[in-house]
Amino acid sequence: MPFPHPGATLVAHVKELRRRIHRQPELGFEEMLTSALVIGELERLGIAYRRVAQTGVVGVIRGGLPGKTVGLRADMDALPITERSGEPFASEIPGKMHACGHDAHTAMLLGAAEVLQTHRASVPGNVVLLFQPAEEGPGGAKPMIELGALDDPLVEAVAMLHVDVRYEAGTLGVAGGPVNASADELRIVVRGKGGHGAYPHTAIDAIPPSAAIITALQNIASRETDPLKSVIVTIGTIAGGYRNNVIADEVVMTGTLRAHDPQVRNELAPRVRRIVEGVASAYNVKAEVMIDHGYPPVINNAELAAHVRAYLKSETALCIIEPPPTMGAEDFAYFAERAPGLHMRLGVRNEAAGITASGHSPEFRLDEAALESGVQALVGFVFAVNHNS
């Protein structure tokens, strides 16, 4: 079943939409301007929509042919970063920047919506457009799902597209299995007894046991986890003490726990607690462990990935690869838990143009030549799901 491709005029419009969004970045659940732009485009196209989860928007395209209901998701939020990209359309809001490509995600989904709505007589089934807030935190996927974003009509397969500066512009990554890691936040408080630095025997120093805890926690990855499975235990901050001649009575550490395998993830918290409590006992201090469970791992449906990859190879000239998983996290995981899901990656790298900075960097840029490939991939997903189904 061949599908319609975006023309030059539409691609130019997608590029302009992306730049408009880029100039006015908004953080999670603050995406008022972005959602207004989305709604304006949906109204222009005659696509029915509803608001969910504060700033989220769900649109529905009713195809003219029988078929499955397919969901397409784009995140809309920016990051609290001051932009140093040098782009002529750089952020106009100090301290806020689209440093992860969500502006492009939203623009490409709007482009796909126009293609699908324009050709809806030949579109199979329904297409649910999921414009999601707050992917960078605190998370907009769960509130959207809880408010029925996938239920009316019932979504039977769902996809997202994320720009990736590791791959050349226009390259499309489609892989099955785990593609993103879980992300749980860790906080450890070590409490001793303060005193004068000249008389350490009269105090209980919280700093040495904190150092020992950091070292001991690495045993989880090096000796307690199957080396063929990915796991990260990172302490990112440590703070304690008052001045050079004072024994610290308290140290606070924060970090992240990540894994691809749900079972490995579930084993991390008890292992951390055992190690922290054991070291604390050995050093005669008290320790408190707090773990905030964040996004689960994103696990692409392997059968769906293979089917979509084969279809797109036969119907497009896209360069399609099977990228390895990353340890980054994505709340698309919740969508993929509700329906067969596919997290696709879109290469936006262009070394000749100096576009190499990673996501979440103040220098992040993307090659807009990739936008056309992204629109093709989103539209193609809809037709692929319904091909030979």
Image (spheres, rainbow, N blue to C red):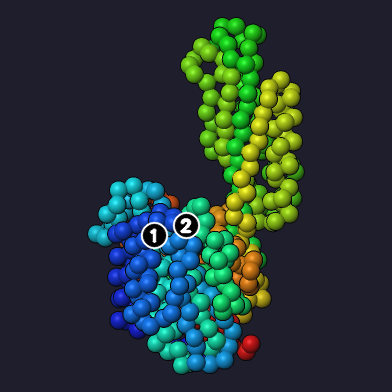
Q: Residue at 74% x, 23% y: name it.
A: 282
How many residues crowd around disc 2 within 10 Å: few (fewer than 14), some, or many (20 or more)? many
Query: Which corner quadrant of the image does residue 112 belong to?
Result: bottom left
Q: Residue, x 49% and y 86% (percent of image)?
A: 62
* Residue 249, x across and y down, in percent: 59, 19
* Residue at 62%, 34% in the rendered image: 188
**In the rendered structure, which amino acid carries the disc numbered 1?**
Glu
- Distance from label 2 to label 1 (Cα)? 8 Å
Q: Position of residue 132 (x, y in %)?
A: 47, 64
Decide if residue 373 is in sight here. no
Residue name at image x 29 percent, y 70 percent? 16
Residue at the outermost top position? 199
The quarter of the image holding the C terminus is: bottom right
Q: Amino acid at mark 2?
A: Ala
* Above or below for 44 versus 234: below
Q: Secondary structure at mark 2?
A: loop
In this rendering, position of residue 205 left or right of residue 352: right
Q: Quadrant of the N terminus?
A: bottom right
Q: Is residue 284 above or below residue 86?
A: above
Q: Which mark is residue 134?
A: 2
Residue 330 % position (x, y): 55, 58
- Front residue of 136 and 52: 52
Q: How many neighbours does mark 1 have within 10 angstroms: few (below 14), some (14-19), or many (20 or more)? A: many
Residue pointed to by mark 1:
31
Count of number-bearing discs: 2
Nearer to the camera, 33 or 341: 33
Task: Using the image as rendered, state which of residue 145 and residue 102 is in the foreground.
Answer: 145
Q: Is residue 286 above or below residue 225?
A: above
Give the answer, above or below, for where 297 lies relative to 161.
Answer: above
Circle 2/circle 1 CB separation < 8 Å: yes
What percent of the width, then of the height, locates residue 185?
A: 59, 44
